[in-house]
Structures are given as C-alpha cells and as structure tokens.
Amino acid sequence: MRRKLTLYIFLIAAAAVMLSTVLGITIVRCREVEGTQRALYQLLSFMDADGAVTDMDRLLRQFEQSGNGLRLTFIDGDGKVLGDTERDTEENHAGRPEVVQAREQGVGEDVRHSATTGKTMVYVAMRFEDGIVGRAAQPIASVDALALQWGAVFIAGGLLALVLALLLSRKLAADTVKPVEDAQVAVAQVGETLQNARSEFTANVTHELKTPLTSIKGFTDMMASGLVTDPEDEKRFLSMISVEVERLTSLVDDILKVSELETVAGVTGTERADLLAVAQEAARMLQPQAERRQIQLKVEGEHLEGCITPDRFKEVALNLMENAVKYNRPGGRVTACVAKERGRVTFVVSDTGIGIPEECQSHVFERFYRVDKGRSRAAGGTGLGLAIVKHIVALYGGEIRLASVVGSGTTITVTLPQPGN
C-alpha cells in the first residue's frame, strides 16, 4: 500500500513538474521570439528614419559582412525583390504574409520555413515612406538557442523538483499510511482479543454448565438404578438436585444478562432512579440471607437520583450487597451508603469480610473469575455478578472502584451521573 501510494504521489508530482517545465520553456521561447521581432522592428525603423535605403547595395554588403545571421530584403510595390543579402533570390515576394501585412497595415510579421535559406526564420516587414517594403529576418535557431539556455535552467530545476517530489512523496506516503497501518494492527489485535475472549467465555460456560449437570445426572442415575431405597436418602438427593437446578438456572440467567448488556446500543440519558430507595428494597430482599449468616446489613445516605433505571440499579445493589454478605464472617457488617460527590452520586458498599488479595483485585470484574473457586461455588455464586455490575455501570456512563485488604474487608464504590449534570 505504501509503495503504491508513493508511486501515485510521485507520478502526479512528476506530471506537474514536466508540464510546468514544458510550459516554462514554451513561454520563454515565445518571449524570445517577441524580443527578436521588436529588435528587427527597431532596425527597420532606424533604416527608414535615417534614409539608409537610398544606398541599398552598400547596406546589403554591410549586413553580409557582419556575419550576424540577419537577412535583409527590399521589395517594391509589385513584390519584386530590389535587393537581398541572399543574392540568389529572384522570385516575387508579393504574396509573403509579412509583406502583405506591411503593405496594408504598415508592419507585418511571420515565423515560417524559408525555401531560400532552408531554415525556419522570424520575419518582420515594414513599409518605408517611399513605398518600398523593408524586411528583416533572423533564423529561429538563434532564438531557440537563447530559449534553450533558459530551458536548461527549467530542466535542471525540474529534475531537482522530481528528486524532491520523490523524497516528499515517500515521506507523505509514510505519514499517510502509518495511521492506517496502526489502525489495521489495532483492529487485528482487537479481533484477536475478541476471539480469545469468545473462546475463553465458551470454555468457561461449558465448564460452569457441566458441573451442576454432572451432579444432577449422578443423583438421578443413582435413584433410577434403585440404589437409593431409604426415603430419607431419596429426600436428601432430591434436595441436592433442586440446589443444582437452582444454581444452573441462576447461571443461565446471568449469562443471558451479560449477553443482553453487551448488545445494548446505548441509553437515552433520561433514566432516573432514587438510589437510596432502590438500595433499601434490595437490602430487604437480602435480609433473610444476612440474618442466617449473622451479618448486620445497613443502608444509609440521602435520597439522590442517578441516571440509571431502577431495575438496572437494583441489579447492581443486589450483586454488590449479596457478595458482601456471602464473603463475610459471622457477626460481620455490610454498609451501603448513597452520597453526593463532585456533581455525581455515589453508591458505596463496604464489608468486614475476608477481603481480596491485591493480585486478584484487577480481575474480579472479569466473567467467571473467582478469587477462591471452592468457596465461591459453596456460596452459590455464578462468577458473573461483578461482570454484570461492571457492564451496567459502564452502560450508564458511570465508574466503579475497588479497595480491599485481606482479612479486613472490601469497599466497592459505584459513581453515576446525576440528572442535570
């Protein structure tokens, strides 16, 4: 791509340089021809004013001896050549364009090939006061020689311009293509990342689904084979199957939520939710679980609105507070607080639980990531709760921060825009 672009730019520049060079040489040649014609006019005007044509033969000899390449011709009213520095001229000149113009308008000019000299000549003719037409001519070759001197300058300049055009075209092509190449690399990297994420997600989903399904199949196979005969054992196995089915249902629900959030195009910005009221409702739903685990659950703060739907914020509050309850100690505390901070509204969930190791803190919002896999499954988690929270908060233009100390607890802060800000 870079080579093609360099070639295209160079060809355009080369065409422009060649065109300007040819145009420049043409203009210089035309100006040299005009300059030659003016000089010849001045020569003829001087002859007419000085009366030099009275001694025509002497004047012709002087021109012949000067060797300046000029041709001088005198023609009468009928076109007959009265004198010419080219002695062999005998034909009538009445039809010569410059002579016709001179007889009609006083002066005339032409550039054409001369049959007498065999050269292309610049002709200028003038009608003198006595009616004789004087004509002066100079070979175009001498004019071209002057033009070529300038042409050499133009050609040298053109070659220099071509070299510069080549260098600049390479630089311009490199500067133009680099962002495209960088973008292609970035797109390839993003594609690779997405492919890896897709493969990892598929593997994780397969593993997470397989675990409860394996348990369910094992229990049902034992019961179907008649190995379980004790009614109490049968009741216990059915209870375990129910737990695994509930876990499987929760996992499927969370997977669907993540997929839905990843496909949402955007939000309108008109969504409103009273964060304190929604958080209090979520806390009431979690209160039985907190009491079973002997956890004190409290929600405090101000009634502040955030730019988010009540249902989506309820999902955020439930996930954060449920995690704080699950990974806490008996007698521990979970505090959720709604407050205002620099024009935005914050929802902070703090607990006195087991905490998260520092090396794991940057991964906890990833799908299916578990700090302690055994404990997470025992607590009934799907590994998608914090990933759902992260997606929801990002969807509504918010931010999420985590601070944790092992053995002391964890604090997660969600910041959302306020209406009007």
Image: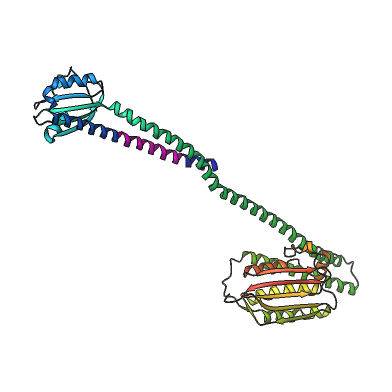
- Please state the total of marks drawn on the protein image: 0
Q: Position of residue 189 (x, y in %)?
A: 65, 52
- Residue drawn at the location 82% of the way across and 79% of the way down: 295
Q: How is the image coloured?
A: rainbow
The answer to whether residue 26 is left or right of residue 87 is: right
Q: Quadrant of the C terminus?
A: bottom right
Which quadrant of the figure has residue 41? Answer: top left
Residue 360, compared with residue 272, is above or below; it is above
Residue 252 visible: no
- Residue drawn at the location 90% of the way across and 66% of the way down: 227
In this view, the residue in front, 195 or 143, is: 143
- Residue drawn at the location 82% of the way across and 71% of the way down: 408
In this view, the residue in front, 403 or 239, is: 403
The answer to whether residue 393 is left or right of residue 146 is: right
Main SS of residues in magenta: helix
- Any magenta on residue 15? yes
Q: Quadrant of the N terminus?
A: top right
Residue 288, compared with residue 383, is above or below; it is below
Q: In the displayed image of the protein, which residue is found farthest to the top?
A: 88
Highlighted magenta segment, given as a residue range: 11-29
Q: Position of residue 339 (x, y in %)?
A: 68, 78
Which quadrant of the figure has residue 377? Answer: bottom right
The answer to whether residue 171 is left or right of residue 282 is: left
